[in-house]
Every structure is written in C-alpha cells, then in structure tokens.
Image (cartoon, grey):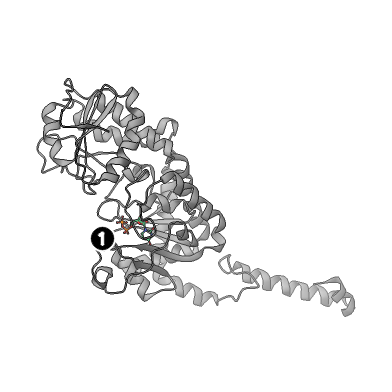
Amino acid sequence: MSKQLCTRMHTMRLCRILGLILTFIVQYARSNDGVCLAKEPCLDPVKRSNEKDPYSAEFNLYFKKIESSLADYVPCNNTNCNCHINVLKDDLRPFKSQGITQDMIKRAKQYGTHYQVIGHKLYRQRECMFPARCSGVEHFVKPLLPTLPDMDLVVNCRDWPQVHRHWSKEKTPVFSFSKTAEYLDIMYPAWAFWEGGPAIALYPTGLGRWDRHRKSITDAAAKMPWERKESKAFFRGSRTSDERDALVLLSRAQPSLVDAQYTKNQAWKSPQDTLNEEPAREVSLEDHCNYRFLFNFRGVAASFRFKHLFLCHSLVFHVGDEWQEFFYPSLKPWVHYVPVPVQNSPDELEALIRFFQEHDDLARGIAERGYEQIWNHLRMKDVECYWNKLLKRYGKLIRYPVEKDSSLMEV
Ligand code: UDP
C-alpha cells in the first residue's frame, strides 16, 4: 500500500486493514504449492490436487529414488581416467589367470580386424570392413606405440558385440565398442570419438570429433539457458530400434508434451520405416539444447548420442540399461540422468515427464550433475587415457612371443 494512497484516505486504521487483506491475498497465492505467484492465474487448490492424483504414487516413487540415489552417490576419483577403471578391470578379468594365448587370438580373428603391435609399429590386415572406423581406432592407438609392448589385437568394428557369455565356450579376446552383460567382449572407446560415426545428412562425413562437439554444443547451451528452453521432451533419430516407438507415439498423441519424430537413415525405403509417417527433418545436436528433456535410446547397440545430450545442460532420459559403452557405468541413474524402463507405457512416460516439468529444481539438479560428469570426466584426454590403460594392461596378458604376420600392412 503506497504512502500516497494512505495519505489520501486520511485514515490510518482503514489503511492498516487494507494492508492486512493484501498481505493475506499474496500469501495465500504463494502457499498454493509454493510456485503460484500473485501475478499468475492460480488454480483452485482442490482442483489442483485432484489433477495430480493420477500420478501421486509415481511422484512419491520418483522423490524416493532421487533421494536414495543421491544419498548413496560417491563421486568418482578422476586421476588418470580412474572414473572408468573398473570397466577395463572387469573386461580383462576372464583372461587374468590364463593370460592371452596364440590359440585365443586365432579364434578371435574371425570376429574382427586383426592388428599387431610389433617393435612400436602398428600393422593391420589389408581389408577393413569400415575404413573410417578403422581409421578412428588407429587415431587413438598410434600415439601410444612408443610405450606399447608387442601384441596381437582383434578389433571388431561392427556395431554388434561378438563373444556371447553362454555360447562362446572358450575365452576369446575381441575388442568391441559396446556390449550388454551377456557378452565378454573387451570394450574400447568407439572410433566415433574421432571419426567414422554414423553419417547423416547433417553430418555427411560422420558424427565424429567429440572434441569439437564438446565445444559447439556447450556454446549452443550457453545461448539457451534453462529458463528459455522449451519444457518438452525431445527426440530425433531413425528407427534403429523399436524401443523408440512408444515415445514417438506419445508425441503424435500429445505434441505439446513431446516432440519425438523419426528421421531417415541409409536403410530407409518407405514411410513404414518411420512408423507410417514421412521422415522428419534432422535436428543438429546443438539445436537439441532448445529443449529441457532429451531422450536417449539404444540403436543397434549403444547410441552415440548419449554423451552429446548431457552437454546441453538439459535433463537426459535414458531408456534401458542393457547396452553399454566404456563410460556408461560412471553415470548414475537419478544422479546424472533419469532412467526409463524399456517396457514403458505412454502413461508412465507422461508421468515421468510431468514430474520433472513440475519439479524444476530436481530436474535442473540432475541435468547439471550430468553435464559436470561428462564435461569433467569424458574429455578427449580421458578417452586417450582409457585406450592407453586398456592396451598396457592387455599387453601384459600376452603369454607368447608375438611374431609378425607377413600378410598385414603397416598403418
Ligand atoms: N542425429 C542427429 N539429428 C537427427 C538424427 C540423428 O543429431 O536429426 C544423430 C544422433 O544423435 C545419433 C546419430 O545421428 O548420434 C545417428 O542417429 P540414429 O537415430 O539414426 O541412429 P542411432 O545411432 O541412434 O541408432
């Protein structure tokens, strides 16, 4: 109440009463869930709580999950890429007692590209199924040659892992970029950190250059702070797995809640491949930063997009926990991202998205921790460091004198 108005009324008592009424109105408006300010049109509190009812059980569950995950969370120690060290220890453990024998390499050769390190030089079999992928691998191995011992190395550049825990009776050391717990492949940082990532119209020479993306996506995020991001779930990609269908269908039913559409990939033949709609226009990873909630799904194996999404400072929803890359275990559900079960109904997806729409502080907290984790612990030097540790420890397991295979060429 302004002093001027009070003076005009000439009665201090009336002025005080009016002041009290005004204070009450403002406080009532604020107390309505703590988010509705006097200047906003507020809902009737009864109606509002009824609206929330369908989700209240889920909402309580999400609160508990976040609370207990944060209570259990111990940040990793980043010296010498140690955040990821348990992954390579686990992957090499099966070879610890027996070491790696010539017979094992002989068996492994059918599953990937054969490399040798001999006398600090790198040799490779002449034919490589995906030249850009081999080149992306060699980019990381070559600088390590001066300190690497002699070794045979079989690198699988296909998407799919090769050594099934139950079907492969004998130990077979094959390096693959991604696997599930069903496989015994040794994970290596994917070629796509440098080159050979999927080529789409937007990235015609392949996704690649993680170092450049780290910068360009972070720059894009700086221009699109949380307050300006659309409060919507977003996904753009091709139908490499039908696990993506549920979100795309929810988007078609509720376009104001979700924008998830299928794009073309090289295998696209007709709208059937984009769930009976015309393919959508591709959206750059930088433009993903325009949205608060970004979805990640597996593709054929793990999808390369996962790490990029965190750079937007948006909240990452990660569907399924089976498919891994070497850095996935350093990211913790409910701490760095929102885990989403593969078997999900549109109602569950909607409840999860709405929960974070209504609990902005929790959404921003997870988004920021996710960003920090990737920014600080998945630098290019962490990728190089992982390759280094992996090959040094693998090299120590070789139990025979490595002899040069004359059919290989130096690369
Ligand atoms: N991608 C993109 N914008 C799009 C479509 C795809 O940036 O509009 C990127 C996406 O992030 C992923 C890659 O292109 O890293 C391939 O995506 P797709 O969905 O085709 O296959 P995925 O590898 O995820 O199975």
Element at label 1: loop
Q: Is mark 1 within 8 Å of ligand 1?
A: yes
| Image quadrant where one finds the N terminus | bottom right
**Residue 310 visible in the shown view:** yes
**Most foreground residue, 367 or 39:** 367
Q: Is residue 317 above or below residue 49?
A: above
Q: Which quarter of the picture shows residue 227?
A: bottom right
Q: At 30% across and 74% down in the image, what residue appears?
A: 277
Q: Is residue 133 above or below residue 42?
A: above
Quadrant holding ligand 1?
Answer: bottom left
**Most foreground residue, 120 or 314:** 120
Quickly name the residue at label 1. Answer: 241
Q: Is residue 399 above or below residue 327?
A: above
Q: At 85% across and 76% down in the image, what residue appears?
A: 5
Q: At 45% across and 66% down in the image, what residue appears?
A: 232
Residue 316 % position (x, y): 42, 55
Three-letter amino acid code at the position of disc 1:
Ser
Outermost residue to the top: 401
